Each structure stands twice: as structure tokens, then as C-alpha cells.
Image (cartoon, rainbow, N blue to C red):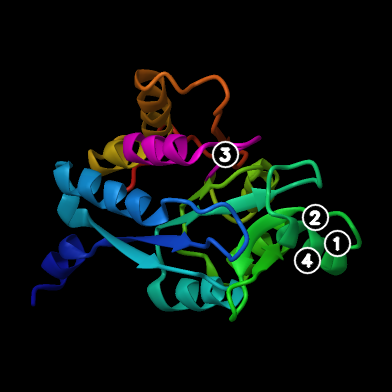
Amino acid sequence: MDPQRGQLLRKHTILFLAANPLGADRLALAEEARAIQLELERSGHRDAFELVTRWAVQPMDLLRELRRLKPTIVHFSGHGTTSPSDELCGDVLAMADRAHGGAPHGLVFETADGRPQLVSATALAQTFGAAGSSVRVVVLNACYSDAHAAALTRQVGCVVGMPGAIRDVAARIFAVGFYGGVGERESVAAAFRQGWAALELHGLVGRERPQLTVRAGLDAERLVIA
């Protein structure tokens, strides 16, 4: 094969990580992955992307898949928590009390037997710093994930996080708007605005307020994936 042609055909991997441990509110994560896939397939540059899904993810799965797949975008869909007052299952908070001295804060992954396991912002940043050099964008479609977004911008150029709670349907609609823009070779900043627009079209902006955090010195208006 012509090396130049092979380079042109190389796809960008979007790694979709889903976690919905026992005891937590059930989320329609498969519907979110399906909606993203369909939106990418409708886009003008669908052949430039491959969506790879991983379910019931454990913390080590993140490290392994970063090494193996070298994704361009990492998308986490599930739960997050930042304080005992958050609307999350008692099992998550009890586990967090034991692991973090009564100060639960993190993204909720799963243990081997399906129980919740928190991963801190520091641990995420260290993991992406160790094995995520290919990653240009991270989307944290989980409640209370803005602290993780801020920490990850030390390693990743653009990170979408949620400063508060976000409903299941709103997370899915934002993702459809965002990846529709990505699939049309819009900049990351433009794709983010299209995610907001999708929420507006469904009357959901207000309570749900995704935020785009960008590393200092990087212009998200000029960052195009594809």
C-alpha cells in the first residue's frame, strides 16, 4: 500500500467508557453510545472515526485501553460525585468514606464484582500523563466532573466536564450535538457550542451546563479532529 494513502485512511479512535455500578441509578449508557454512533455515521467525515465501546469499566481498563488503542478522544459516561449531599447511591458514599477519609470525590468506575470504585482527579491526570499522549479531547459526561476537567488539562488539550448534576437525557443530547460537529470537521470549540445548541433545542439548558476547559496556550477554535 502507498504509505501516503495508508496515512490518509487512518481513523481517529473515540474510546467510549461506560460504568454503571450496582446500587447507582441506572443510566441509558447503551443508548448514548448508539446515539453517538448514529450521529457520526450521518456526518460527512464518518470514515475518519471509529467508536470503540467498553462497558462496566474498571480503573485499570482506562490505562490498558489508552496503551492499546491510542485514542484521539476519550468519552466517559456514568456517575460522578463530589460531596455526601450529591444524589448518588449510599453504597458509593459508604465506599468513598472508607477509601478517602469521608471526602468522596471522583468518577465512579466499577470493581470486578460490579461495586462502585471512585477514581480521583489526580489519578486520572497521572494516568493520561503516563499513557494518554495520543488523546486530544476528553468528554466527561458525568455529574460533578468539572474538577477532573481542570486537572486533566495539564495532560490533555480540551476537556468537557459537568460542574453539577446532569440528567441522563441531557448528557445524551449534548453528546449527539458535540459529535455531530466533530464528525463534520468543526473545531472542538464549535462542536462544544453545537452540543449546547442541541440542549437549547430540547429546552434543557439551565440546570445542565457543560463546560469546556482548555489548556493555556491552546486555541480550541483552531483544533479540528479528522
Asked if one can make out residue 221 in the rendered structure from this viewpoint, the answer is yes
154 or 164, nearer to the observer: 164
Q: Are marks 1 and 4 in contact (CB under 8 Å)?
A: yes
- First reached walking from the N terminus: tag 2 or tag 3: 2
Q: What amino acid type is highlighted by mark number 1?
A: Asp
91 or 6, nearer to the observer: 91
Q: Nearer the viewer, mark 1 or mark 3?
A: 1
Read off the magenta span.
159-177
- First reached walking from the N terminus: tag 2 or tag 1: 1
Residue 32: % across, % down: 36, 49
* Neighbourhood count class around disc 1 (C-alpha, 10 Å): few under 14, some 14–19, many 20 upward: some
Give the structural element (helix, strand or loop) at label 1: helix
Q: Which of marks 3 and 4 is in front?
A: 4
Q: What amino acid type is highlighted by mark number 4?
A: Met
Q: Relative to 50, is 70 above or below?
A: below
Would you name the residue on which mark 3 appears? 214
Q: Relative to 129, is 226 above or below?
A: above
Q: What amino acid type is highlighted by mark number 2?
A: Pro
Would you name the residue on which mark 2 appears? 104
Residue 173 in magenta stretch: yes
Identify which residue is drawn at 33% across, 47% down: 225
Would you name the residue on which mark 4 appears? 95
Q: Are marks 4 and 2 in contact (CB under 8 Å)?
A: no
80 or 84, nearer to the observer: 84
Q: In which quarter of the image is residue 183?
A: top left
Q: Distance between the residues labelled 1 and 4?
A: 5 Å
Give the structural element (helix, strand or loop) at label 3: strand
Identify which residue is drawn at 15% across, 43% down: 42
* Neighbourhood count class around disc 3 (C-alpha, 10 Å): few under 14, some 14–19, many 20 upward: many
Residue 12: % across, % down: 30, 59
Q: Are marks 2 and 1 in contact (CB under 8 Å)?
A: yes
- Judge from the rendering whether residue 104 lies leftward or rightward of residue 153; answer left or right: right
